[in-house]
Image (cartoon, grey):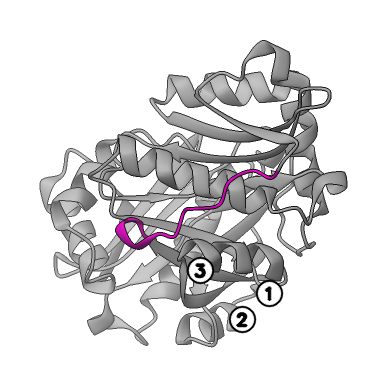
Amino acid sequence: MLEIKPLDLDDEAAVHAYADVRTAAHPDSVRERVIASLRAPSPDFGEVVRLVARRGGEGVGITSVGLLGGVNAQLAVGPITVHPAYRRQGVGTALLDALLPELRDRGCTAFESWGVVKDSAGEHWAMARGFRIAAVRTMQRLTVSEAVAHAVAPAGYRVEQWVGATPEPLLESVARTRQSIKDAPATASAVRAPEWTPQVVRAGEAEALAAGVEQRVVVAIEEVGGQVVALTDVPLHPSDSADTRWGTTAVTPAHRGRGLGLAVKAHMVRWLREDRPELERIDTGTDAANVHMIRVNEQLGFVTHREVVVVSRSC
């Protein structure tokens, strides 16, 4: 008989059942890290809903779905994962049926999963259960020791870096530069980008600080006028050690085509390599239509390892 319950972190058997499914489905996962991550804060989400499905006490499926905040407060994001030995037995559908009421009770109107491998059985399962494809993303990975990070800012620009709070004189131009991310290729995802104002930038910085996230930022500043015109960031979470994920990169429209995106990202790689020698890999995901940023990543040494789809449905 299939039993689905919210994950109780005080129930050692349930925690190990959860870890069994996660490591079986993702063999590169480290069991100890999976278990530790369950008790670590989740700075990207206000709340995480985790369900574990067991049959005869054995873990057969899990969900770990985060509830976003701010302008995306009605959106939940995360995977439904079934143990490879128990696929095609209705476990995923049963987990979805148990999950949706939990999300509706929390005010969610949309549910998305962002890492479904393109053309996989997971994509076909999602399409058959009311999801639609909202975007296609190219997933790339950088081996830090093999990075090609020689690019520097062109004449007329300088690069600056900081951790945490934006220097006050640069705050307004940082907000304008972040706002330019809205020029990126449109998708059908339910995610809404915030209207970047100085106040929103400060609020995001405060949230990251409270969650223990080390927000590293590199910007390009135009010498004439002293305004930020390109920006990239890497949020280093407390659990990040050998692996991390890139944040966002944006260049204002009037300054595109001058190599500024490559320059700030190369500077970030050099900074991380010097400051974080234990860091081995950096992952990033880019909308498949954003061929320019994919090419910039390739120039740094990022290698494409898969394409994924974002699948979306109502709760």
Residue 213 occupies which quadrant of the picture? top left
Task: List the residue tagged with mark 3.
Answer: 139
**Callout 2: few (<14), some (14-19), or many (20+) C-alpha neighbours within 10 Å?**
some
Residue 269 at x, y percent in the picture: 44, 47
**Could you tell me how far apart the alpha carbons at marks 1 and 2 are, in whole angstroms?**
6 Å
Q: Residues within 10 Å of mark 1 (few under 14, many from 20)?
A: some
Kindly indicate whether the residue at mark 2 contacts the one at mark 3 (C-beta within 8 angstroms). no
Residue 127: mark in rendering: 2
Instruction: Say few, some or many: other residues with alpha carbon within 10 Å of mark 3 (under 14 / 14 to 19 / 20 or more).
Output: many
Q: Residue at x 38, y 25 (%)?
A: 212
User: Which is more foreground, mark 3 or mark 2?
Assistant: 3
Q: Nearer the viewer, residue 73 or 30?
A: 30
Indicate yes or no whether the magenta region holds residue 152. Answer: yes
Q: Is residue 90 above or below residue 180?
A: below
- In the image, 186 versus 170, the foreground residue is 170
The residue pinned by badge 1 equals 132
Q: Earlier in the sequence, mark 3 or mark 2?
A: 2
Q: Residue at x 66, y 72 (%)?
A: 288
Q: Which residue does the image show at 70% across and 66% down from the upper left?
A: 292
Range drawn in magenta = 143-154
CB-based contact (under 8 Å), mark 1 and mark 2: yes
The kind of secondary structure element at disc 2 is helix
Q: Is residue 274 above or below residue 142?
A: above
Task: Kindly identify the amino acid type of the residue bearing the numbered disc 3.
Answer: Met
Query: Which image quadrant: the C terminus?
Result: bottom right
Residue 195, visible in the rendered structure:
no
Q: CA distance from mark 3 to mark 2?
A: 21 Å
Write down the quadrant of residue 68 in the picture: top right
**Residue type highlighted by circle 2:** Met
